């Protein structure tokens, strides 16, 4: 890993399911790994619909951001992986509530499957504007 890069780990978000960090902070950038709707308390998937899963995935992203001293206001880019584009509208209803003023740049792609049968996975890039 780069000398000025550091891993972020919090118990308030799910433990990584493989060999990766919840996030990496490199300079003033924070790269949050994809978060699915895992409840960090019990390790199980929350809910069986896109709205509930989106809320939990976003809560997990927020927990990682918080552990790094950032917030949703600092997010500049989101990538969304969704299991079915037919769920896109329902996903957007929940997602929009997190970014009322100026939403970040975003990509959304349909994938064949996600870990643990999740319906959505969300990753983020944030800019930490606090003095270094």
Image (tube, rainbow, N blue to C red):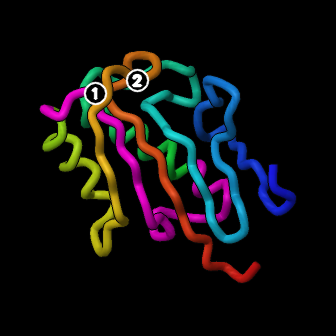
Q: Which residue is mark 1?
A: 83
Q: Are marks 1 and 2 in contact (CB under 8 Å)?
A: yes
Q: Picture coordinates of residue 91 (x, y %)? A: 23, 42
Residue ranking furthest to the right: 3
Q: Which dot marks residue 99?
A: none
Q: Is 23 drawn above or below residue 115 in the view shown?
A: below
Instruction: Give the magenta part as a residue range.
Output: 64-86
Q: Measuring 86% from the left and 58% from the top, which residue is drawn there?
A: 3
- Is 23 on the left or on the right of 108, as rendered? right
Image quarter for residue 16? top right
- Is 132 on the left or on the right of 42, as rendered? right
**SS of the residue under disc 2:** loop
- Is 67 on the left or on the right of 123, as rendered? right
Instruction: Give the mark count.
Output: 2
Q: Nearer the viewer, residue 67 or 128?
A: 128
Please say whether residue 57 is one of the residues in the magenta stretch.
no
**SS of the residue under disc 1:** loop
Q: Which residue is mark 2?
A: 114
Q: Picture coordinates of residue 29 (x, y %)? A: 63, 65
Image quarter for residue 69? bottom right
Q: Picture coordinates of residue 34 (x, y %)? A: 50, 39
Q: Picture coordinates of residue 6 (x, y %)? A: 78, 54
Q: How dense is the environment of label 2, judged by Cα within 10 Å: few (below 14), some, or many (20 and up)?
A: some
Q: Measuring 30% from the left and 34% from the top, which residue is drawn there?
A: 82
């Amino acid at each position: 890993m780069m000398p000025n890069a550091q891993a972020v780990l919090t118990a308030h978000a799910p433990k990584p399911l493989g060999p990766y960090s919840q996030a990496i902070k490199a300079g003033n950038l924070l790269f949050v790994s994809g978060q699915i709707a895992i409840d960090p308390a019990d390790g199980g998937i929350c809910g069986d619909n896109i709205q509930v899963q989106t809320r939990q995935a976003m809560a997990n992203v927020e927990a990682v951001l918080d552990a790094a001293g950032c917030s949703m206001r600092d997010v500049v880019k989101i990538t969304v992986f969704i299991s079915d584009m037919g769920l896109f509208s329902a996903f957007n209803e929940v997602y929009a509530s997190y970014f009322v003023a100026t939403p970040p740049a975003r990509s959304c792609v349909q994938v064949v499957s996600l870990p643990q049968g999740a319906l959505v996975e969300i990753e983020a890039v944030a800019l930490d504007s606090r003095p270094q």
